[in-house]
Amino acid sequence: MHKRVLTLDEAKRMAAGAESKAMEEGWPVAIAVVDDGGHLLCLHRLDGTQLGSIEGAIQKARCAVLFKRPTKSWEERLAEGRVGYLSLPGLMPVEGGIPVILDNQIVGGIGVSGVRSGEDAAIAQAGLNALLV
C-alpha cells in the first residue's frame, strides 16, 4: 500500500483557501495545517488575531488527526454531558478542526481558532475545499 502524505504545497493551498474565507468575512483567526502525525506544516495568523488562538488552531488540527474525526463530534458529546472524554490526552472538544482525507487515508488536519466555533469550522472547511477542488 502506498502511503499518501500531505505536501507543504497542499498545506499552503489549504491555508490560503481558509485565509481567503476569513478575510472575506472579516474574521481574525489563526489557521493551522498539520501532517498525519499532528506536526505543524503551516500556520497563518491573520492581523488582529488573539494570541491564544494560535495554539487553539494547532490543537484543533492535531485532535482531528489523532481521533480521526472533526472536533465538532467531541463538542457534541460534551454537550450531552459525557465529560469523561475530557481526560483523553490530545482532546480539543471545540468545533473548528477537520481531518484531511486523501486517497482514503488521513494525511493531516486543518484547525482554525479565533471566532465562534461554527465560524472557525466554516473557515477550516473552506481550506479543505481549496485542496479538494
Image: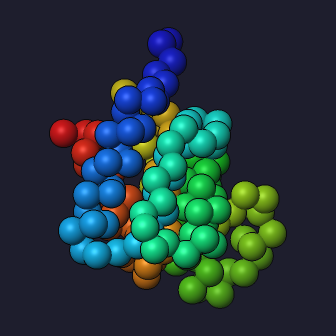
Q: Is residue 110 above or below residue 26?
A: above
Query: Residue 85 location, x and y as percent?
Result: 72, 71
Q: Quadrant of residue 53?
A: bottom right
Label tally: 0
Q: Is residue 110 above or below residue 73?
A: above
Q: How is the image coloured?
A: rainbow
Q: Is residue 39 above or below residue 117?
A: above
| Residue drawn where x is 81% and y is 69% of the image | 87
| Residue drawn where x is 37% and y is 33% of the image | 10
Query: Residue 111 location, x and y as percent?
Result: 49, 57
Q: Which residue is outermost to the front?
A: 47
Q: Quadrant of residue 63?
A: bottom right
Q: Is residue 54 above or below residue 101?
A: below
Can residue 101 be seen by looking at this rendering? Answer: no
| Residue drawn where x is 50% and y is 12% of the image | 1
Can residue 12 be seen by looking at this rendering? Answer: yes
Residue nearer the viewer, 117 or 67 = 117
- Which image quarter is the C terminus in? top left
| Residue drawn where x is 69% and y is 63% of the image | 91
**Residue 56 appears left or right of 33:** right
Residue nearer the viewer, 48 or 29 = 48
**Residue 72 appears left or right of 66:** left
Query: Residue 2 location, x and y as percent?
Result: 48, 13
Query: Residue 82 location, x and y as percent?
Result: 68, 80
